[in-house]
């Protein structure tokens, strides 16, 4: 942790205003809720500030550190790597970079690299371009394909796992796709605006997505695209081909949102049967109180995946199987805010998948709130307010 005894007047402050610049989107939530979201995020970020370790990390773990850095960087454009807390966090991540471009310490190379890659992109810093390029090449090179002696008929073809074994899963694949796709909007006209190197990168990503779609089909309970014997036909997704964390090969919430998000990021049209079937499952199993088919297990992972997925899908209203209309942004934001502790953190009493770790879960929650509100476009507080503090 940065020494609390050192008196530092942090120059970085966030100016929240109701002004929407021409290039910015309109607020995605009403002004009253936006204020509540702003306040909740600030409480969470202030709490996380005091959890930073002396080496710049959070809990000496690259993936968790990267999630928190993204939480800060997405709070407002004025949050940059010039802020010592952020700079120290990235110094830790840089210390985890391996010669092959991966970013991890001792295990889970793919998982950590994907999440760290996202944070480096969120920094929007030209100094990180080589790190980003090398991490992308590493991730794309680790996809299971012909280089792994697998054909497209293999259940594992196109997948990505934790790293260190050959078992891919949808959770790791969705982190990889998200990290690769988050800046694809820059590649809208590759023949005219991209350099030869950028065109090659664009082509490599497309090939990665195409292979990933093969794996995604093996994780979707949809007979028309997944004829495997284990496949159901409800349109939802499972953790890996032939196995689900919800038991047998049952579809469940977090993986169905992960599947929907991955399809969209991989450039599948919204009218495609795979997207429509996944959304229909979501519509029929809508919930913000619990993770469908999993209860409180992985609840906060579910929240951030849900928010990202529905934002990517582009809907504000979900009509459930009882014909009830839900403004998902309002409902999910209110649910997350309601369960925040007075100190600013979140925690899941159900500790499966590390969710009894308040540092990890607080990052998930803040990322979900930022996705819900479309910050900073919808921020409404008219005063300067610190999201960093020194004691």
Image (cartoon, rainbow, N blue to C red):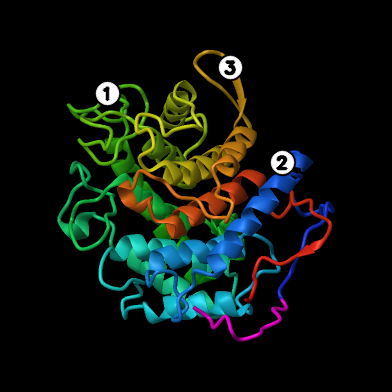
Q: In the visual, does 362 lie left or right of 105? A: right
User: Which element type, helix, strand or loop, lies under badge 2?
Assistant: helix
Q: Which mark is residue 33?
A: 2
Name the residue tied to disc 3.
324
Left-right relation of 271 to 139: right
Spatial separation of the CA atoms under disc 1 and disc 2: 39 Å
Residue at point 39%, 45% (across, down): 349
Which span is picked out in magenta?
A: 1-11
In the displayed image of the protein, which residue is found farthest to the left?
Answer: 149
Image spot of residue 119 (x, y percent): 50, 66
Left or right position of 203 against 326: left
Q: Kindly report which numbered mark, 1 or 2, lies closer to the viewer in this rendering.
A: 2
Q: Callout 3: helix, strand or loop?
A: loop
Per the model, the C-alpha gap separating discs 1 and 3 is 26 Å
User: Is tag 2's residue or tag 3's residue first in the polypeptide sequence?
Assistant: 2
Q: In the rendered image, which residue does mark 1 sit on?
A: 232
Residue 94 x %, y %: 43, 79
């Amino acid at each position: 942790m940065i020494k609390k005894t050192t008196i530092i007047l942090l120059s970085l402050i966030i100016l929240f205003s109701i002004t929407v610049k021409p290039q910015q989107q309109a607020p995605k939530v009403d002004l009253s809720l936006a204020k509540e979201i702003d306040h909740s995020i600030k409480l969470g970020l202030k709490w996380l500030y005091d959890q930073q370790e002396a080496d710049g990390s959070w809990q000496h773990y690259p993936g968790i550190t990267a999630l928190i850095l993204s939480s800060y960087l997405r709070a407002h454009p004025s949050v940059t790597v010039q802020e010592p807390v952020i700079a120290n966090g990235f110094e830790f991540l840089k210390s985890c970079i391996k010669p092959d471009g991966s970013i991890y310490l001792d295990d889970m190379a793919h998982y950590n690299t994907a999440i760290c890659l996202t944070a480096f992109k969120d920094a929007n810093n030209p100094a990180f371009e080589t790190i980003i390029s090398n991490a992308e090449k590493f991730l794309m090179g680790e996809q299971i394909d012909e280089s792994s002696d697998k054909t497209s008929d293999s259940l594992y073809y196109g997948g990505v796992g934790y790293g260190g074994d050959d078992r891919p899963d949808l959770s790791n694949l969705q982190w990889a796709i998200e990290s690769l796709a988050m800046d694809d909007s820059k590649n809208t006209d590759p023949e005219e605006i991209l350099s030869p190197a950028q065109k090659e990168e664009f082509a490599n990503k497309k090939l990665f997505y195409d292979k990933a779609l093969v794996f995604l089909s093996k994780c979707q309970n949809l007979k028309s695209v997944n004829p495997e014997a284990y496949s159901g036909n409800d349109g939802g997704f499972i953790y890996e081909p032939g196995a689900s964390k919800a038991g047998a090969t049952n579809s469940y919430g977090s993986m169905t949102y992960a599947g929907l998000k991955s399809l969209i990021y991989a450039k599948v049209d919204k009218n495609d049967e795979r997207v429509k079937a996944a959304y229909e499952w979501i519509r029929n199993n809508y919930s913000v109180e619990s993770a469908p088919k999993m209860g409180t297990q992985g609840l906060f992972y579910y929240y951030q995946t849900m928010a990202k997925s529905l934002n990517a899908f582009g809907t504000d209203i979900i009509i459930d199987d009882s014909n009830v209309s839900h403004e998902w942004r309002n409902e999910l934001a209110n649910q997350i805010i309601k369960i925040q502790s007075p100190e600013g953190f979140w925690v899941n009493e159900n500790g499966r998948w590390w969710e009894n770790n308040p540092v990890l879960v607080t990052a998930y929650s803040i990322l979900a709130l930022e996705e819900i509100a479309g910050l900073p476009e919808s921020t409404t507080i008219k005063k300067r307010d610190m999201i960093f503090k020194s004691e």
